[in-house]
């Protein structure tokens, strides 16, 4: 299995489809107390790739995203983005320019107007004084307006965020990532609580966010249909170990059955 994974991953770069790796993970291991959440995970991701991370609960998906965002540090191995090692010594402003994350719960401040929540994406680069000043007098107002226009809700810019629907708030969270302008966008189960129509809409927005910018997208996803329609590649994790790494078009029911250790009928029901 290990040799197959390495061959699949390396072939992606040999044929030029990924270019120079934007993200490089080498032997990444992370434990919590006596539980190993990730065990010697390695992969490389190029600019413009859209990578879905799949696996059962407890497989290490969220730990991987937290490591990539710089929230956690690996116990062993290394993670680099655009050649920069994600370590505790990396300045916050530089980390913010490298990685943006869209959480399932959006992480918006409901009492604030939409413009302030969008411009929060710039706080990492601005520093404390300018960030605080922006809460009184929004800085880069045009930048926020343009991002909201991309999301189709420019008319909501001055509205209190708590007055928006769930779908509109998700668009605000994506607009915040746009103004942050990171090299890598992470999405932690971005459509887990959405109905199928809205899930498709959000995935299309995420594709547009990365498609023409050279950014890479890594998202944890629970729907094989979305994986094969919106992602170029899929990584499977189980019990903290890399089970497969392949183009999403090559993903089969047998791969999913092995990953989830389910009978064929149960696996089909779970995924569709």
Image: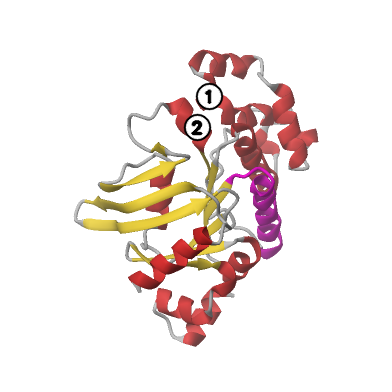
The residue furthest right is 155
Q: Are marks 2 and 1 in contact (CB under 8 Å)?
A: yes
**Helix, strand or loop at mark 2:** helix
Which residue in the structure is indicated by mark 2? 96
What numbered label is drawn on residue 125? 1
Where is the N terminus found, in terms of image quarters? bottom left
Where is the C terminus found, in terms of image quarters? bottom right
Queried whether the magenta region covers residue 213, the answer comes back as yes
Write the residue at 46% across / 47% down: 23
The main secondary structure of the magenta stretch is helix
Write the residue at 50% across / 32% down: 96
In the foreground, 40 or 171? 40
In the foreground, 21 or 248? 21
Instruction: Answer whether residue 244 is visible to the viewer in this image.
Output: no
Horizontally, residue 32 falls left or right of residue 250, namely left
Queried whether the magenta region covers residue 113, the answer comes back as no
Instruction: Answer whether residue 37 is visible to the viewer in this image.
Output: yes
How far across and down, in percent of the image, does residue 139 sit? 65, 18
Displayed quadrant of residue 183: top right
Q: Which stretch did the figure color magenta?
A: 196-215
Q: Residues within 10 Å of mark 1 (few under 14, many from 20)?
A: some
What numbered label is drawn on residue 191? none
Write the residue at 54% across / 16% down: 132
Number of marks in picture:
2
Horizontally, residue 93 falls left or right of residue 48, namely left
How far across and down, in percent of the image, does residue 171 sit? 68, 44
How far across and down, in percent of the image, does residue 66 sit? 40, 46
How far across and down, in percent of the image, does residue 43 sit? 41, 56
What colour scheme governs how the chains and residues are painted in the rendered image of this protein? secondary structure
**Helix, strand or loop at mark 1:** helix
Write the residue at 55% across / 19% down: 131
Displayed quadrant of residue 213: top right
């Amino acid at each position: 299995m290990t040799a197959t994974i390495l061959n699949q991953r390396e072939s992606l770069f040999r044929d030029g489809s990924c270019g120079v790796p934007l993200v490089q993970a080498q032997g990444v291991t992370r434990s919590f107390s006596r539980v190993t959440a990730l065990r010697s995970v390695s992969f490389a991701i190029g600019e413009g790739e859209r990578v879905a991370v799949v696996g059962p609960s407890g497989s290490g998906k969220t730990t991987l995203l937290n490591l990539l965002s710089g929230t956690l540090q690996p116990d062993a191995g290394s993670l680099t983005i655009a050649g920069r090692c994600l370590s505790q010594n990396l300045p916050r402003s530089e980390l913010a320019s490298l990685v943006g994350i869209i959480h399932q719960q959006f992480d918006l401040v409901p009492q604030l107007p939409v413009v302030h929540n969008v411009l929060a994406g710039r706080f990492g680069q601005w520093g404390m004084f300018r960030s605080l000043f922006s809460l009184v007098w929004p800085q880069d107002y045009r930048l926020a307006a343009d991002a909201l226009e991309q999301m189709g809700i420019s008319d909501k810019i001055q509205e209190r965020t708590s007055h928006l629907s769930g779908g509109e708030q998700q668009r605000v969270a994506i607009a915040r990532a746009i103004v942050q302008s990171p090299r890598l966008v992470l999405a932690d189960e971005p459509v887990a609580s959405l109905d199928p129509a809205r899930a498709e809409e959000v995935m299309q927005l995420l594709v547009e966010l990365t498609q023409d910018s050279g950014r890479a997208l890594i998202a944890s996803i629970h729907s094989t249909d979305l994986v094969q329609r919106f992602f170029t590649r899929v990584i499977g994790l189980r019990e903290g170990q890399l089970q497969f790494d392949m183009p999403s078009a090559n993903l089969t029911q047998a791969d999913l059955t092995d990953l989830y250790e389910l009978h064929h009928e149960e696996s089909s029901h779970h995924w569709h």
